[in-house]
Image (cartoon, rainbow, N blue to C red):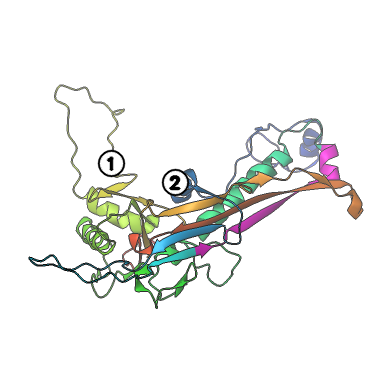
Amino acid sequence: MPLPGIGVAPAAGSLYNELASVTRRAFVPRLFVQIYYGSPTLFYMTGNAQRAAGGLNQVTLPAQGNSMVQGQFTGYGGGFNSPTITPGIQNLQFNLAYWVVPVPLPFGETVIQATDREISILKARMNDVYAVTRQQMATRAFSNNGSNPLLPDSFQNAFDNGTNFPTYGGISRNTNTNFQGQYINLNSGTFSLGTAGFTRASMARVLAYVTDQSGGEAPTFVVMHPADYATLNADFIGNEQQFVNPGGSYSMDTAVRSSFPNLNVSGIPIFADHFCPIGNVFGVNTKYTAMYLSEDAAFDFSGFYSLVPLGQIGQQGVVVVGYDLLSAKPKSGFWGYNLQGASWS
């Protein structure tokens, strides 16, 4: 609705009403969305997603949890004990989670927007389907989804040590501890970081620890909330150096870069993600951890179907995506919790 009494527009009254009746509003034919956040973690995991198809368990990962042979030292005669067959392979088994977004196309909208539209509501709605789906997937990647069997697995499921998720992929972590992830209290015990949050030194210490515990393989990346990331970033900023180019020309327009969009500690990139809960840090090794995306429901749209059989003039469609976020080797990553010192809350 036009706003009276602002700038050159007259105050509310007969003069303004007359002007509003015969004058079109200036209109920017673009829709500016106000409500969503980006997720670099989801972008990375989706870009490297693995295919999954049908079956009772759409993703089954054979995993070795015990030694299958035994070795021994021998002497001059070369004797050794006969080998014993020891089963060591189990299947981690998962079903994909399916996210659906119904899309309405009512009769009135179709007629009214057939011509003379500035913004296509249908196009905006279809873009919103993708945005809503992305927000949901990004949120679920970092949350505790164990209470609802319809929800996908997350980094929490994958890297827990049995405290919160005693069973993973149908295997008991309490019975077979080799399927435990690295669930680390960052403010007690081994690390006890206190209230200061991460520094370069403390982050390097954590990364060395988790690399050792995972069998010598470092995480591919580490992700944390921007508030926790800002605290670590401040430790870097305090040691920045700006180098001047001798003989160079400098003015008010000369740009000086400061701070960092991502950090690198011990050769491991660290970045911020809005959806990662404050006080939590996740380290992911993408050699073992991936998103599995259904080849039959990979952001697929059904097309629009008539609602006439239901006694309504209009159409309806649905977008479907089947996926899960899984780790074939939980100890390859870590979930650090109880991190203090966030720059805001």
Query: In the rendered picture of this protein, how many numbered marks are placed on residues?
Result: 2
Q: Give coordinates of residue 215: x percent, y percent.
A: 26, 60
At 25% across and 62% down in the image, what residue appears? 206
Give the spatial CA distance, label 2 vs label 1: 25 Å
Nearer the observer, 57 or 238: 57
Residue 253 visible in the displayed image:
yes
At 47% across and 46% down in the image, what residue appears? 43
State which tag comes first along the sequence, 2 or 1. Answer: 2
Q: Give coordinates of residue 258: x percent, y percent.
A: 28, 41
**Bounds of the magenta segment:** 93-112
- Residue 177: name its quadrant: bottom left
- Residue 328: name its quadrant: bottom left
Q: Is residue 108 magenta?
A: yes
Q: Amino acid at mark 2?
A: Tyr
- 118 over 302 or under it: above or below: above
Secondary structure under the numbered disc 2 in the rendered image = helix
Residue 258 is marked as 1
Q: Nearer the viewer, mark 2 or mark 1?
A: 2
Q: Amino acid at mark 1?
A: Ser
Secondary structure under the numbered disc 1 in the rendered image = loop
The crowd level at tag 1 (other Cα within 10 Å; few <14, some 14-19, many 20+) is: few
Q: Extreme front residue here?
A: 77
Q: Give coordinates of residue 248: x percent, y percent.
A: 19, 22
Marks 1 and 2: in contact by CB < 8 Å? Answer: no
Q: Is residue 173 left or right of residue 201?
A: right
Residue 139 visible in the displayed image:
no
> Dot 2 corresponds to which residue?
44
Instruction: Give the overall secondary structure of the magenta segment.
Output: strand
